[in-house]
Image (tube, grey):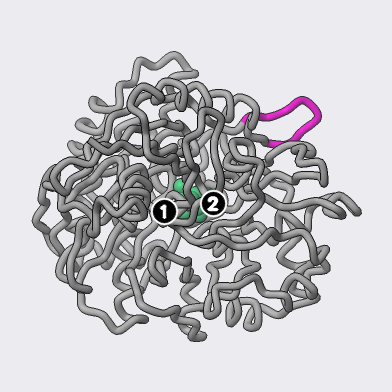
């Protein structure tokens, strides 16, 4: 049996998985799982502990050795990077995209490049943490004689010593031209970045080098969302997807970017996918709202179990209070129930007080955001949708899948849960010539839409969704 190692780092947990190809399918086995979350450092700044992360990955790889894997692929969340000096050493920390250091950077960039030009080149949704803004926030001179490596490329460098930038993740930097899929020399110059900062691009399926132990490291779709979307078990083009974990990424797979003023106004992104495809989608906060809330309740000594609170939430009245899940107020770590309460107060809605009330607000707000993104995407790309694939950890959240089906007025097919790891292993298996297509998988469940779609529309209007 042919085995591949998929290293998949999410913003709350990382895992090293073995993907074994058997009769046209990939069986995934979790070999190692570890927490990843960003940490506040004394003196300020929210950072990932890169040494700990790479230690966990190396330990996971050692545990995979006996399976004699053909290759290793790495994917993670996007946009964050480390700076490597000319001796190949990591210089300083890997900051988290939730670090507030990018405040004011959009304004600074706008003095040099207007929004239309920026979107026309990159096709990227404005998010305050896009790599370009993080780079602009670096202290004077810090980028000189350094190479910027996005997190999966930084790990690959640690394993192989090779420098490069995998293209699906590079597309989240706001420095890649969405049409030519090459670094935009124009944007690098206009942003005032050193010309040598960005390493050569590499494509999913390309060999990067060899890890200690002799196993080849392959570039995969190293942006976790790119890997997750590569694993969506859909055919034809009448489907939407929601890749739902810490973030909810809802949109379409398209053959080419949509760079229209309407797409820019709707803040849609055109990220690079495998095989020249485009992920036309919008980011919303996702299960982050729920996990941060659970953290607060647990810190206050409440014995809150997720399953219990989800069940209780679904007994609460519908559409009592809705928030805009896109609101940047929810971006930093912190007291989410208090922020949700404040948002409801500010919009004149009843304030959710108990955990089930807060969770009902979160679930409905997320379902609405999914529906709104998919409807807008379909309109902008002139597509009809028959079905929504909800992949990632959110596929295990039954109420969210059900509400998403209701809000979209479309059936939701849930799963695969480990979509990123599956997409990662798939790209490797295809490169090795043992698989041609993404394996068809049996959905965990199918949710048929129920209820009154107009009630969802009216609820959406409360938070400015058309
Ligand atoms: C999902 C994800 C999103 C990206 C966000 C921050 O894990 O990669 O696609 O916008 O994290 O990097």
From this view, report whether residue 385 is shown above or below residue 396: below
User: In the picture provided, is 195 more to the left or to the right than 384?
Assistant: right
Question: Predominant secondary structure in magenta?
Answer: loop
Residue 44 magenta-highlighted: yes
Which portion, as a residue range, is magenta? 39-46
Residue 142 in the image, given as x and y percentages of width and height: 86, 49
In this rendering, the answer to whether 193 lies above or below 158 is below
Q: Is mark 2 within 8 Å of ligand 1?
A: yes
Q: Residue at x 36, y 81 (%)?
A: 380
Q: CA distance from mark 1 to mark 2?
A: 8 Å
**Magenta-colored stretch includes residue 298:** no
Screen quadrant of the C terminus: bottom left
> Which percent across, then down, holds residue 35?
48, 26
> Which of the numbered marks, if any, corresponds to residue 225?
1
Label 1 crowd (10 A; few <14 / some 14-19 / many >=20): many
Circles 1, 2 touching at the beta carbon (< 8 Å) = yes
Res 174 → quadrant: bottom right
Is 461 situated left or right of 215 in this image?
Answer: left
Relative to 368, is 144 on the left or the right? right
Q: Secondary structure at mark 2?
A: loop
Tell me the residue that label 2 is attached to. Answer: 78
| 263 vs 443, nearest the viewer | 443
């Amino acid at each position: 049996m042919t085995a591949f190692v998929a290293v998949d780092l999410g913003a709350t947990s990382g895992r090293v998985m073995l993907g074994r190809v058997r009769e046209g399918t990939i069986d995934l086995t979790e070999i190692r799982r570890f927490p990843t979350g960003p940490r506040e450092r004394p003196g300020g700044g929210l950072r990932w502990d890169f040494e700990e992360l790479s230690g966990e990955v190396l330990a996971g790889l050692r545990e995979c050795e006996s399976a004699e894997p053909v290759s290793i692929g790495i994917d993670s969340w996007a946009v964050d990077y480390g700076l490597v000096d000319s001796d190949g050493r990591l210089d300083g920390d890997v900051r988290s995209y939730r670090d507030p250091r990018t405040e004011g950077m959009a304004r600074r960039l706008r003095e040099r490049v207007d929004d239309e030009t920026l979107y026309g080149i990159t096709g990227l949704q404005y998010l305050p943490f896009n790599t370009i803004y993080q780079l602009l926030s670096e202290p004077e001179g810090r980028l000189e004689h350094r190479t910027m490596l996005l997190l999966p490329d930084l790990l690959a460098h640690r394993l192989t010593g090779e420098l490069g930038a995998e293209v699906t993740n590079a597309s989240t930097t706001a420095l890649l031209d969405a049409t030519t899929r090459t670094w935009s020399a124009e944007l690098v110059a206009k942003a005032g970045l050193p010309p040598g900062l960005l390493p050569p691009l590499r494509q999913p399926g390309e060999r990067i080098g060899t890890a200690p132990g002799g196993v080849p490291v392959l570039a995969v779709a190293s942006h976790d969302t790119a890997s997750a979307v590569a694993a969506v078990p859909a055919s034809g083009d009448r489907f939407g997807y929601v890749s739902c974990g810490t973030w909810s990424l809802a949109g379409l797979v398209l053959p080419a970017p949509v760079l229209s003023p309407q797409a820019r106004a709707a803040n849609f992104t055109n990220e690079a996918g495998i095989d020249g495809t485009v992920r036309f989608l919008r980011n919303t906060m996702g299960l982050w709202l729920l996990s941060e809330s659970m953290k607060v309740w647990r810190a206050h000594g409440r014995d809150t179990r997720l399953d219990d609170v989800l069940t209780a939430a679904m007994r609460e009245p519908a559409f009592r209070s809705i928030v805009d899940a896109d609101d940047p107020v929810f971006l930093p770590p912190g007291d989410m129930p208090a922020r949700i309460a404040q948002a409801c107060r500010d919009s004149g809605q009843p304030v959710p007080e108990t955990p089930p009330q807060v969770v009902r607000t979160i679930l409905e707000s997320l379902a609405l955001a999914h529906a709104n993104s998919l409807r807008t995407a379909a309109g902008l790309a002139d597509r009809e949708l028959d079905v929504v694939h909800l992949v990632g950890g959110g596929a295990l959240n039954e109420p969210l899948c059900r509400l998403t089906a209701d809000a979209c007025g479309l059936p939701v097919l849930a799963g695969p849960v480990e979509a990123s790891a599956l997409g990662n292993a798939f790209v490797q298996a295809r490169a090795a010539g043992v698989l041609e297509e993404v394996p068809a998988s049996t959905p965990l469940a199918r949710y048929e839409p129920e209820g009154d779609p107009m009630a969802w529309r009216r609820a959406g209007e409360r938070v400015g969704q058309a």
